[in-house]
Each structure stands twice: as structure tokens, then as C-alpha cells.
Image (spheres, helix red, strand yellow):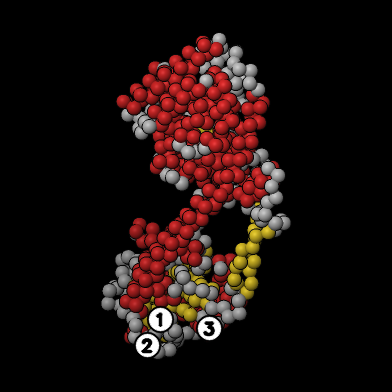
Amino acid sequence: MKHLDIDVTERTNSDRDWLRLGSQIGTLANEWSGRTDLVASVSSSGGEGAPACYKPKLAEIEINKNMVFGENVSPEMVDDFTERETQYEWAKVTGAVIHEAFHARFSNMDLEKLSKELSQKELQALILLEEGRIESLGVESNSDSRVFLRSCAMDIVISEVKDFSQLNVASASNLVGLVHARVLNDILFMSEVGSVVRAVNDVLGEDVSEKLVSICEKFQAIENTSERSVELMKELAREWVKIVSDKQEENGEEDSEDGSGGSGGSGTSLEELLSELEDIATDVEISNFSELDNQQREQEWKDSSKQKSNHSKESQKSKNIADKVFGNKDDGEHGATTADLDVSNTNSSIVDVRKPNAQERVASVIIGSDLERAKYRERDITEVSSFIPAGKLNTKVALQVKAEESLGKVSTLPSWRKKVRKHTDEPTLSVGILCDISGSMSDAMSPMATTAWVMSEATKRVQGKVAMAYFGNAVIPALKSGQTLSDVVTYNANDGTEKFDSAFMAINGELNLLDGNGARLLVVVSDGIYTDRESDKAKHWLNRCKESGVAVLWLPFSPTPHYSKNLCENTGAVVMPNVRSTIESAREIGKVCCDILSKTY
């Protein structure tokens, strides 16, 4: 068998263009195998002649890109493979990865030791039987994997049969391990592979086939690789070899140590068998499409329900914190004054309160004009399917169309999809502002005060909603939604920590940022130097902003902006590390706000 390569110690690297996918597949393989040490490669030479293989000595999974993706597929055609939608779109690839991941999870016996204790034929029999065992255990532990294993099952069978020289006792017994074993665990159905079963029975006889199937069943019942279990594996492998050898002797076929079976056999045409297997593969692919679609819809529904439940809890918690931070009393349109700021739990204090100067007013006008342009890009999105090329090809549907057409059916499935956007008439803009008043921000307090006023004033100028909070040891309400910040308020920075998590939830609850409509922007003024817990929370909320279409602008005002960059990496948040003055950088900030709002929602 090619899938469990116990001898090779030389690593196969991904083709350069496929490195991204190799990394993503490696992530999934570790998740599905319950390991952390696996690496994966995707190349035109991988798989050792099979669609994929697992190399235990290297903890490596190899994918042959031509066999599983297709020779005409480029890496640009494949989206992020860690996304479930992509896995269903490329179900055959997913099945190959799952198969090898199950090898990595369950085939953890000492194969090198076994190679010394068993003859070559016995070791090959054990590895053949292991194919069915790992899939059986895998489906039992994760029932969703079955449809993916089913997607690639016939490709695995065909790749093995192509190495047969003829259909004799040895090759027919291999088909029992490849086909009959998968019928036992419902990867394939007897109604689909009946012609193969008949061809095998013609060579082996029904009694021998039944004995071999019985061994497959016993082998699949082995749940672990304890010493006792491995002994049973060895006994079953030896019994398999004896049955096959006895049948070879009975048929007058030559035997060989490597299990190839030598000459002799029934004379059945191998070309006819391969043709039959390819027809079966097409039938399996067509019948499996509905199973894949049903399972995908069910999973999406469950995910959606769970996500809605989680988001509902998240929203309620944010609302509770916002009520606590900002209070429920009606402070009026101009209610945000220095007297309203709760500083009881912070070591920081207000050191200056002044009216905005002319430069700050000009900066607010400049940024406000960009926010005005950005908010009118709000649009409704509708996904449209098409029969003619338009937008992105739905690979899974295209394969189904091809399969149906090969059977003489007229497909009614649209293979292309695109998104149609239209502008809405009355867009809204919500801006949340979070300002860090921990000790590491002491040199940035003056530009932070200017930034807070300029951004709040710019949002007010375009009839947007704005709320603002300072965060250090506590979350301090600076501006409640519906209020106006009339003064430029400067703090000192004497707090010893940063409550980013609570601050974000307060702003989210006040503005309904994550679940709201219209253009939504979060502006964070902070150097990003947080505790591990707050760093994790910050990354979580930044990713939630990305999922929910909330644009994020991060202004470090720090000589060490790499902390902020690390927090924002891969979250969609934009860091402006070189900004030192909101007044001097007003046009640049306004342009960035316009750009990220336009791209995000």
C-alpha cells in the first residue's frame, strides 16, 4: 500500500506556488489527527504514486496536487482551506487529507519493529487491513468525515489497481481490503460496487472472499495499538496471507515474497476492471453530491444557530457593561462634561481642559469630509448564481454538472456565482473611540486628547453616532452616544494596566458596533502593550470586528509600534505607526478612514 510509507526518510517540499495551501492543510491535518507535529506538502511529485500518503518517520503528509486537485488547477483557484466552505468545494482533497490524518492519529504502532517480526507479505497485509481500520475508527469518532472519505475512496482504489499486472489471487485479495473493507464501514455501498465484488468472487470464490472480509471486520474492531492489540493485528495479517497463499496454490499461481502473486490468474481483463471502477467512481461522485450538500447545509445551520446564540450573549453582556460604564440617566445633548467622568477606580486624572483651537477644528473638517464620502458607500449585497461565466466558478457544482453530463443527463445547476451590490439611501455612521491611559502612554496624552476631540467632532459633523471611553485600571466614560464633546480633555497616564476587554464591550454595547448597520469604525489610540490576557481579548475583538464589517484604525502614538502591529496582524485592522500629530496627519487619517470603511463593509 502506498498510503502508509514506513521506509521513506526524505521530505518532499511543497511546490513554491502551493506553500500557502500546504500550510493550511498541515493546520487541518493536526486538528483532525489530534497532533501538533504534522507538516503537509502539496506538490506534483508527492504521494509516492497515490493521491496522498503519510510518512510516520517524518510526521509528514504528502498531497499529489495533480491527482487530487487536477492538473489544470492553480493555487489561486483554491480559497483558504481552513474554511469549511472550501473543504466542501474541494471534497475529494478534504477526504484525502482526512484519510492521512486518520493514519497519523490511529496508525501509531511500531511499524519498523513489525517489519522485522513479519514477512514482507504479512506486513503488506497488515498495512492493507489498516486502511479500513483507520477509516472505521475515524468515522466513528467524527461522523462528518464519512462523506469526505467517500469522495476520495474510488480514487484511492483506482490508484492501487493501476499497479496490478493482472487480476489474480493476490490482486483480487487486495481489492477485498480496498473495496469490501469500505463497504463494512459505509464509505462505499454494496449496490455501487457489486460488479467489483463479482469479479473478485470469480477469482477467489465466495468462500475465500467471505473469510477475507471476516478478517477485515475483525481488524476494524481493533480500537487501539496496545501490545495485545498489535499481537492480534499480527495474527490476522498472518491468517490473511495463509488464506491467500492456499488459494494461490489451489489455482496453480506462482507465489512471490512481495505478495504480487506472480503469473497465473483468471485472465480477466484488467482494462475492463479499470473501466468499471471509473464508472463506479462517477456514480459514487454523483450520489455523494447530495450527501455533501445536505451535510454542509446542516452544519451551516448549526453554526448559524450557535453563532446567533453566542452573539446574543455577547451583545447582552456588552449592553450590561455599557449601561454600567455610561449610565442610563439622560444627560442631555451636551451632557459630557468633566464632572461626568468617573475616575474613582483609576490612578489617572485630568490635567487640562480647554476649548479646541483653530487647527483642531480644521482637522475635524478634513476628516469629517472623508467620513462623509465613506459612509455613502454602504450597500446591500445579493449573491446571484449563473449558468454562464460570471464572477467565481463554484467548483463543486461544476464537477457535478460534468458528472451528470457524462451520464447523458441535462444539468440545471448554475456553476457560477457573483455578488451584486447596490447603494442604500440613508447610510449611517457609528464611530467608537478607545483611548489608553496606562503608564506606557504618558508621552502621548496631549496628541491623544486632540485625536479624541477631532474624531468625535468629525463624526458629529456628518450626523454620525460617536461614543468614547478611556481605559486603564478602569473604563472611564468620556462621551456617551448622542452627546457632544465640547472640550479637549487631557489626562495624565498613571494606571498600571489596560482593561481593553471591558472598554471594547462598553463601546460595543453603547453603539451596537458588531451587530449594527451602516458604516462602523473603531478608533483605538494605544501602544498595544498589554498583559497576555488583554492581548488575547484584543485579538478576539479585532477578529470579531473583521467578521462583522467593523473597520478598525489603530494609532499607537508610540516609538515601539510593533506591539500594536502584532495585535492587529491578520485581523484587518490598519495601524498608522508614523502618526505623531492628528492635526498634521489629518488628511492622511481621513483618507485611511475612508479607505478602510469602503473596504470593510
Residue lying farthest left?
Answer: 344
Q: Is residue 28 visible?
A: yes
Q: Quadrant of residue 165?
A: top right
Q: With 321 as the anchor, is 434 left or right in this view? A: right
Determine which residue is flagged by label 1.
480
Which residue is labeled 3 in the image? 463
Q: Residue at x 43, y 85 (%)?
A: 483
Residue 190 circle label: none
What residue type is disc 1 on? Lys
Q: Tell me the amino acid under the disc marked 3.
A: Gln
Disc 1 crowd, CA 10 A, few/some/many (<14, 14-19, 20+): many
Q: Secondary structure at mark 1?
A: loop
Q: Position of residue 492 (x, y in %)?
A: 35, 74
Q: Amino acid at mark 2?
A: Asp
Residue drawn at the location 70% of the way across and 50% of the way down: 410
Q: Is residue 80 visible?
A: no
Residue at 57 percent across and 47 percent down: it is 289
Give the structural element (helix, strand or loop) at label 3.
Answer: loop
Q: CA distance from mark 2 to mark 3?
A: 19 Å
Question: Is 422 left or right of 470, judged from the image as shown?
Answer: right
Total marks placed: 3
User: What's the distance in space between the residues labelled 1 and 2, CA to CA?
Assistant: 9 Å
Query: Alpha-carbon neighbours of circle 2 within 10 Å: few (<14), some, or many (≥20)?
Result: some
Task: Give the vertical position of 579 relative to 326 (above or below).
Answer: above
- Sequence-earlier tag: 2 or 3: 2
Mark linked to residue 331: 2
What SS does tag 2 mark? loop
Mark 3 neighbour density, 10 Å: few (under 14) some (14–19) many (20 or more): some
Mark 1 touching mark 2, by CB under 8 A? yes
